[in-house]
Amino acid sequence: MVEGKGIKEIGWNLDNSYARLPEKFFTIVDPNPVPSPKMVIINDSLAASLGLSVDMLRSSDGIAMLSGNQMPEGALPLAQAYAGHQFGYFTMLGDGRAMLLGEQITPENQRFDIQLKGSGRTPYSRGGDGKAALGPMLREYIISEAMDALGIPTTRSLAVVTTGETIIRETELPGAIMTRVAASHLRVGTFQYASRWCTVEELKALADYTLDRHFPEAKSSENPYVSLLKKVVKGQAKLIAKWQLVGFIHGVMNTDNMAISGETIDYGPCAFMDTYDPATVFSSIDAQGRYAYGNQPAMAGWNLARFAETLLPLLHHNQEEALKIAQDAVSEFAELYHSHWITGMRAKLGIFNEELQDKALIEDLLNIMKKYGADYTNTFRGLTLGNFQDVTLFGTSEFSKWHELWKARLTRQEHSEESFYELMRNSNPAVIPRNHRVEEALEAAVIKGDYTVMERLLKVISKPYDHSTKQIEYCTLPEISKRPYRTFCGT
Ligand code: AMP
Ligand code: MG
């Protein structure tokens, strides 16, 4: 392992707590040198919050580290073992093209995984080459940054470097490595792996590690593992409600892509819904619509049931009791989710207080949006700005009727008109990374080497709730010819 000059000045402060888990949970891997790494994008503000010097990361030493050619001081590169239900089928997986360098302890004393994605083969690669193509890595960078700006828990992207290699997919593509920053990479699939291939002691070590890392307050509860389950259920209920409220479709909600931390993880064929329709699927590999927009809450519930099953030996010494505890905890998901969703929907409509008929008011709007094929984001943006020109839905008699009911509803609360429009402005993004804009940015970057289109897009989506005039061109819909949109798995 080569350690270059100037490493200390970068600001690395790495710990390797994951490597202190029982060794079945990971494999130490060798870095896989790449021929000529070049930085194409770096996240200045994220670097600063991690305590890393952007200038040093941009230096040849920094780029060497972000490409796996040099290891930062304190790094212990490893590939994590995990399993997962992929489209309902259980498989052994593991990091087949990623390596965890360690956990950066920030100046604020927070701990974040630093992972290189696309960094070469590992013992878990199966038939894969361990590499990643530039387009999908930039796509993850854009969408995860957009999610963060929208206030949705997510892993983030520190940088993307090209490797100088050509990788073979359907065509030849430039190779790239993304540095992913995450609260952790513990997944439902990590617990499935432990449950299937490890001893109960090892499973307990994983659960204790997770409690220490994410839910230390739960360790003093009567049964910390029951608390762990409940906390994960709560986190997912909150997360999935946030996805639904902005129209985010993950695309591959396999159990290996559900993080225990409650962050959105693994951006493959994800996309934001344009025309409102619960059946919307963008991913080319989801022919059955398992992970369609409207199915996401149910699929999260399904994944949480798989998580709960893995914890059974820790929930109670009597397995019948354990099963009951697990079922009760998982069954709370639906109600928790609904409560976050309806609170969020009320906010999108400027409603602070609760009335029993709110659900019907919301559903009526969604139904006419579906009937008229209204754009999800622009409908709520129009309502927020009181701009009823752009969306055809607004010209219909059904909408006029609904509009009267809504206006009457808004008056049945103590807040001023100013405060409910402010609530709406803060709850309805003006801009999302629209599919045609993302494609345009990727095409310019990957084919022409022009990163300015992507940089402009990143700037606009970094302030989704600004509702400024500068954003207007990013609110327009694609030409009909660019729809329906299809996304492909990021491999
Ligand atoms: P994903 O669809 O990104 O969640 O990946 C599912 C599994 O396939 C994970 O175990 C990945 O590490 C693995 N994988 C994806 N792409 C590759 C690749 N090019 N080489 C090796 N493993 C891969
Ligand atoms: Mg995955």
Image (cartoon, grey):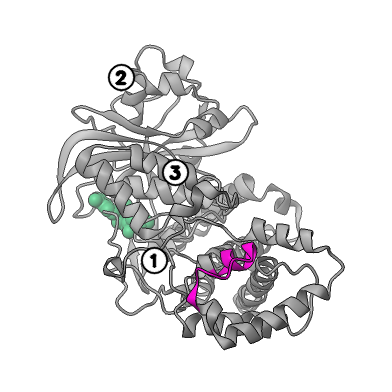
Q: Distance between the residues labelled 1 and 2?
A: 39 Å
- Mark 2, ligand 1, within 8 Å: the answer is no
Residue at figure coordinates x 57%, y 47% from the top left: 209
Q: Nearer the viewer, residue 269 or 32?
A: 269
Mark 1 near mark 2, Cβ–Cβ under 8 Å? no
Q: Would you place residue 46 above or below residue 87 in this image? A: above
Compared to residue 278, the image places residue 269 above or below, namely: above
The Cα–Cα distance between marks 1 and 3, rounded to whole angstroms, is: 22 Å
SS state under label 1: loop
- The reply to whether residue 469 is in sight is yes
- The amino acid type found where label 2 is placed reads Val
Residue under numbered circle 3: 458
Label 1: few (<14), some (14–19) or many (≥20) C-alpha neighbours in 10 Å: many
Give x and y (percent) for residue 114: 45, 37
Q: Which residue is drawn at 28% across and 33% down?
A: 30
Q: How crowded is mark 3: few (under 14 residues within 10 Å), some or many (20 or more)?
A: many
Q: What residue type is labelled 3?
A: Leu
Mark nearer the N terminus (1 vs 2): 2
Location of residue 277 by image quarter: bottom left
For the residue labelled by badge 3, is the local secondary structure a helix, a strand or a loop?
helix
Q: Which circle's residue, 1 or 3, is located before the other in the chain?
A: 1
Q: Residues in magenta?
A: 379-392
Q: Which of marks 3 and 2 is nearer the N terminus?
A: 2
- Residue that sits furthest to the right in the current view: 414
Q: Which mark's residue is nearer the viewer, 3 or 2?
A: 3
Q: Residue at x 57, y 63 (%)?
A: 381
Q: Tell me the residue that label 1 is attached to.
A: 251
Label 2 sits on residue: 2
Q: Which amino acid does label 1 sit on?
A: Gly
Q: Per the image, is 402 magenta?
A: no
Q: Determine if residue 27 is in view.
A: no
Q: Where's residue 322, x and y in %?
A: 63, 73
